[in-house]
Image (cartoon, rainbow, N blue to C red):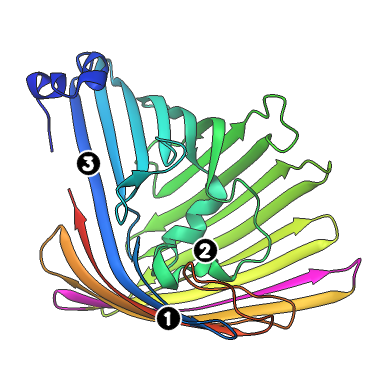
Amino acid sequence: MKKSLLALAVLGAFAGVASAQSSVTLFGVVDLNARYVKNDGVARRVSLSQDGINSSRLGFRGTEDLGGGLSARFWLEGGVNADTGTVNAKFFGRRSTVSLVGGFGEVRLGRDYTPTFWNNTIYDAFGTNGLGDSSGVAQLLSNTFVRADNSIGYFLPAGIGGLFGQAMVAAGEGVAAGKYVGGRIGYGAGPFEVAAAFAQQDTATGDKHKTINVGGAFDFGVAKLMGYYDRDTLASVKDNRYSISGVVPMGQGEIHAGYDRSKKEDSALSTSNTISKFAVGYVYNISKRTAVYTTFARLSNGSLSAASIGSAPAPTAGGKSSGAEFGVRHIF
C-alpha cells in the first residue's frame, strides 16, 4: 500500500530514505501451514511450517522520477519466519538493491536473484515453494543457486518485441567461492514463453561450478504447461535435472501438479544416483490476496541419497519421503 511521507516518518529508520522518494511501498506475504512428513526409517513429524505456495516476507520498495525517462529505484526485502516471529540472519536477505532505469534498460546493484534461478522458479507450478518445490530433487547446487551478493546486473528494456534478458557479475571480494557470472535470454509472446540461462561460480577448490538451463511455458487456456531442464557440473560430478508441471484453473481454484527428476553422476568414482518426486496441490483463492491450499508430495531416493521433503529428519539411504500440508497465504 502507498505510504505518505507522514506515515513513513513513523517508521523511524526508514524516514530518511522515504523522504527522497516520489513513491514508497510497504509489502509482504504471510504463508503458514500445518505439515505432516513421514520418512522411511524415522518417526513421522507434524509441525507448523511456512512458505507452502509463497515465501513469507516483508519489504520496502521505492521509485524516484529523475526526469527525461530516467528513474532511481530501491528494493529492500527480508524473509520472515512467520511461525516463530523471527527473521533470517541476513535481515534483507531476499533482496537488497538500488538501480537506475531508463530507455536503456536497468542497471541494478546489490543482492539479487541469479539469472539461472529464474528458469527454475518461473517454470515450476509450485514456484520452488513448499513440498512441491522442484529443486528438492537437486543433488548438486552452487551457493548462488538462488541469489548472489555484491552483484551488478543489467536488464534489457521492456517493449522490444517480446525479447527479455539479463546479465550479472558478482565480485568475490577476496573470497575464493565468491565470484559469479551469469546471463539469461528469452522470448515471450502471447501464451508462449521460452528462456535459456548459464552461470559460472568459483569454488574454494579452484574448480568452477557451471550451470546451464532452459525452460518454457505454454498457456492453453484450460491449463498452463511448463517445464525446464538444468545441468550442473563441478569437477568430475554432473547433475542432470528436469521438471515438468502444470496449473489447471477451476473457477476461483487451481490444481497444481508436477514431476521432477535428477540424475547425479561422478565419473571419478563411477557412481550414479537418481532422485524423483511427484507432487499435486490445490489452491483456492478466497480473494485476490488471500488463499487456502493443500499439497501432497512423495520423493523417492536412489541408493546413494537420503533427501527429504520439508524439514523432517532425513530418511534412511534409498528411502522414501512423503508428506502433506494445509495452509493459508495472505499478501499485503
| First in residue order: circle 2 vs circle 3 | 3
Magenta stretch: residue 55 in it? no
Q: Nearer the viewer, mark 3 or mark 1?
A: 1
- Relative to the observer, which residue lies in front, 279 or 154? 279
Give me the residue at 70% from left, 43% from top: 201
How packed mark 3 is, by other alpha carbons closer than 10 Å (few <14, some 14-19, many 20 or more), is some
Point out the stretch of residues depicted in magenta.
250-269
- Relative to the observer, which residue lies in front, 85 or 11? 85
* Residue at disc 2, secondary structure: strand
> Residue 211 vs residue 158: left or right?
right
Give me the residue at 56% from left, 81% from top: 42
The circle on residue 215 is: 2
Image quadrant occupied by the N terminus:
top left
Q: Amino acid at mark 2?
A: Gly
Report if residue 221 is visible in the image.
Answer: no
Q: Where is 165 relative to 33, above or below?
A: above
The circle on residue 27 is: 3
The image quarter containing residue 100 is top left
Q: Name the residue beneath numbered marker 1.
A: 323
Magenta stretch: residue 255 in it? yes
Q: Where is 188 relative to 269, above or below?
A: above
